[in-house]
Amino acid sequence: MSAVKLEKPTLDPALLEERRMLLKGNHAVSYGVMRCRPEVIAMYPITPQTPIVEKIADLALNGEIDAEIMTCESEHSAMSACITASLTGVRVFTATASQGLFLMHEMLHYASGARTPIVMPVVNRTLGSPWGFWPDQTDSLAQRDTGWIQFYTEGGQESLDMIIQAYKVAENPDVMLPAMVCHEAFYVSHALEPITVPSQAAVDAYLPPFNPEHRLDVDRKESWGNVVTQDMFYRHRRDMGTSMSHVPDLVQKADAEFAEQFGRRYGGILEKYRCEDAEMYIVAFGAMCGTIREAVDQMRDKGLAVGLLKVRLFRPFPVQALQAAVAGVPRLVVMERNYSPGLGGILHQELKAALYGTENAPLVHGYLSGVGGVNVSVDRIEELTRKALAEAPVTESVWV
């Protein structure tokens, strides 16, 4: 790999102000990264993530990003570089998708175990084989046990804003764990939308510099990465669990503070849309939520009492928030764009586990409705909702 420190050109002060721009979802992420002032950025291209790092390189060349940019020979190397850089006490960034995320898999565990608060967008894409480039969330969901916080976003503005919030949560001294901000290939990554890029001063006021208590430093007598005893490993994993338990409250706090600073709010862990008096919630995450909103409006106009429950935080899985959110609702239908062979829809199965044993738990349907990027239209969502209202749920996730 090679490290490039670009000579910094003179920066137009106007570029530091808030800007309203027409951006693709991936480029919105790049601008969010820019405002977070990372000091080390490790790059490796992969479709459909590549526009993120290409735009970052453009911004660095223009003097809008002042960071050491590393062009690595693989995603495994990129994550290795991020871990080492983070351990020295600097804010770091990388991005990936699909097979690249899987090549990182070994180092994802190391990143969380080393307590490095890396923020990494994952552009959700189908996994081979068969080969494809379509929107599918199985790539990041397959990493759900690696110790990373996972956020799922609906559009480009939310992705930009969540990059900033993810650093705030991940770098909290009570957390110190890495975070993925996941959005779907093409439906979000390459879709144009009006984006507000916040001012540098506003982001600086919201996100303090990264200054960890512990770091790699020759002047500090600290040991890193040594072999540990069984008891020490047990305590280490337990401590990771304790840190994860702080995340939901910190996500809620970060969302509230973000709303105060920037005027945009997403609900934190969960977002409800037209859920008042609903007889059924459609539960989903990611880009499909945008279509579901339109379907909910259409069904409400027809007198059908349904609403959307959007899951924004998947790891740690927000068990208590979900239990509270669905209390008193007779039925839920989960619509998702992922598939775990032998298990089914991952959100469907984890939601059922979260509700197991709760008093008057709702009936839960699970539909594999968007796997492989298959388009799920407004009319199709209404059709599936009516199907769920008319039938008894089954244990398995259903292909529809």
Image: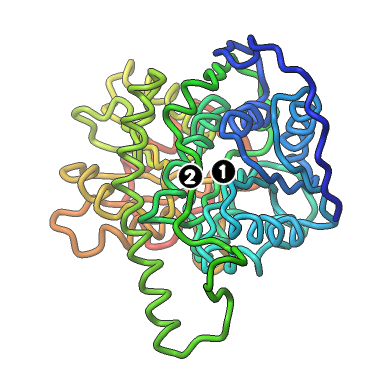
Residue 180 seen in the figure: yes
Image mark for residue 91: none
Of residues 183 and 213, the one nearer the viewer is: 213
Looking at the image, the residue that sits furthest to the front is 219
Q: Is residue 268 left or right of residue 183?
A: left
Amino acid found under the numbered disc labelled 1 = Cys
Of residues 271 and 56, the one nearer the viewer is: 56
Image coordinates for residue 264, horizontal then vertical, percent: 40, 21
Image coordinates for residue 225, horizontal then vertical, percent: 58, 76
Quick check: marks 2 and 1 in contact, CB under 8 Å?
yes
Q: Is residue 43 left or right of residue 361?
A: right
Residue at mark 2: 151
Q: Residue at x 41, y 20 (%)?
A: 262
Of residues 70 and 329, the one nearer the viewer is: 70
* Location of residue 84 with respect to 327 vertically, above or below: below
Image coordinates for residue 95, horizontal then vertical, percent: 68, 45
Q: From mark 2 to mark 1, how far is it between C-alphas?
A: 6 Å
